[in-house]
Amino acid sequence: MNKERDIYLWLSHITSFRSKDIPKLRLLFPDINELMDSLMDKDIMESLTKTGILKKETQIEIENLDFDTCISNAKREMKFNNISYTCLYDSDYPRRLINLPDPPLCLYYKGDLSLSQEDHTIAIIGSRRPTHYGLSVADEFSKSLSAKGMVIISGMAYGIDSRAHQAALDTGGKTIAVLGGGVDICYPRTSISLYSSLCQKGLIISEYPPHTQHLPVHFPRRNRIISGLSDGLVVVEAAMKSGTLITTDFALDQGKSIYAIPGRISDMMSKGVNNLIKQGASLVDSPSDVITDIMGIPLKRKASVKSISTNNKYSQSQTNVNPTEKKIIEMLGYEPLYIDDIIRANGMNISETIHILHSLEDKGLIESIEQSYYVLKH
């Protein structure tokens, strides 16, 4: 078994394999030892390249990648960087990935691999350039779903991904980041705090060996693992041409449920999500929609994203606000509103409006996210 694991480890270091190469080789040589012997046979390799099953570049790389040296160096590097790995058919290999058309031969990781085997997992994905609304929704869904025991999965990218991970960690929940490069490299580099937290309290995982740079060509392949590990995908915001939609394509091929959170028709970041709904994705406006569908737990419906972002009704008895304060509260939602627009809409003077805004901030009902822009405090 150790020899077979070493073969998987060696194969994972061949960088010129195309996505279709390994599935074809596994069909031709179902036994991993037979596959290894065939790749070491010059005549068989010549035949594989002549028939187009493998590229000539791959043949050359295999000839130059010494097996023993590769395995020795790989294990030494992993030990030095505190990186673990699991191989296809190992007992701890994520069961949700085994039946993919092209499952990763090896997975490298930092953190708790058992999170990938939890009963309920959900991916929360979206734009790298989200609106304030999108970030707020990602935060709400991640916290609510992780509080119910779901493992939150995403790609640690800027925007929706990072917010989903952080929200889960903030509530003591479980979360997995799937990277498009080596797990020893924090990407994006500015997310070092999140990366460290995930290593200690969650799981960072990748099919790419340590020291592999995070390249754009890797992310579509990475996305099949995000969807593969998940029972369903929550899509928060996505433009019409977006990497997020690549993940949804993989999810559909894998038979996973797609939960789309609608956005305003005028927002570019909502075009892709709204189009998913047109094509049949489940429209969700509350975390309870996802919880009920995946976990089968009927929940009393709370205020939905739609009602929060459009109605914003606060009971005076619940929040201790006067009628004038309530009027301003009802103007605000997830999207930042400039103070001049608030003044024009409520017909009050500047000083009175500023006084009320400060009062509502003191009560914890609204917040200023940047100079002179206000939103409801979620």
Image (spheres, rainbow, N blue to C red):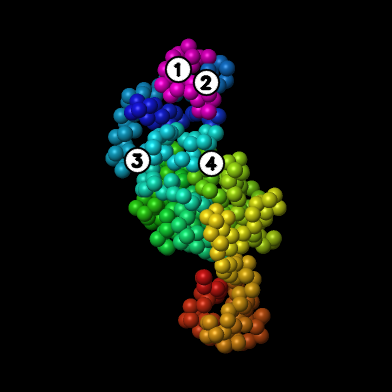
Q: Do callouts 1 and 2 mark residues in contact (Cβ within 8 Å)? A: yes
Residue 114, horizontal then vertical, whole percent: 39, 46
Instruction: Check disc 3 and report its element: helix, strand or loop.
Output: strand
Q: 68 left or right of 188? A: left
Instruction: Check disc 2 and report its element: helix, strand or loop.
Output: helix
Judge whether residue 185 can be spotted in this image: no
Q: Is residue 6 magenta?
A: no
The amino acid type, in three-letter code, at marker 2 is Leu
Region in magenta = 21-47
Name the residue that disc number 4 marks. 224
Determine the main secondary structure of the stretch shown in magenta. Answer: helix
Q: Is residue 26 magenta?
A: yes
The amino acid type, in three-letter code, at marker 1 is Ser
Residue 257, horizontal then vertical, whole percent: 59, 49
Pointer 2 local density, CA inside 10 Å: few below 14, some 14–19, many at least 20: few
**Which is more foreground, mark 2 or mark 3?**
2
Q: Distance between the residues labelled 2 and 3?
A: 30 Å
Name the residue that disc number 3 marks. 84
Q: Do callouts 2 and 4 mark residues in contact (Cβ within 8 Å)? A: no
Please tell me in which quadrant of the rendered image residue 110 appears: top left
Q: Earlier in the sequence, mark 1 or mark 3?
A: 1
Q: How far apart are marks 2 and 4 (CA)?
A: 24 Å
* Residue 153 in the image: above or below residue 322: above
Instruction: Check disc 1 and report its element: helix, strand or loop.
Output: helix
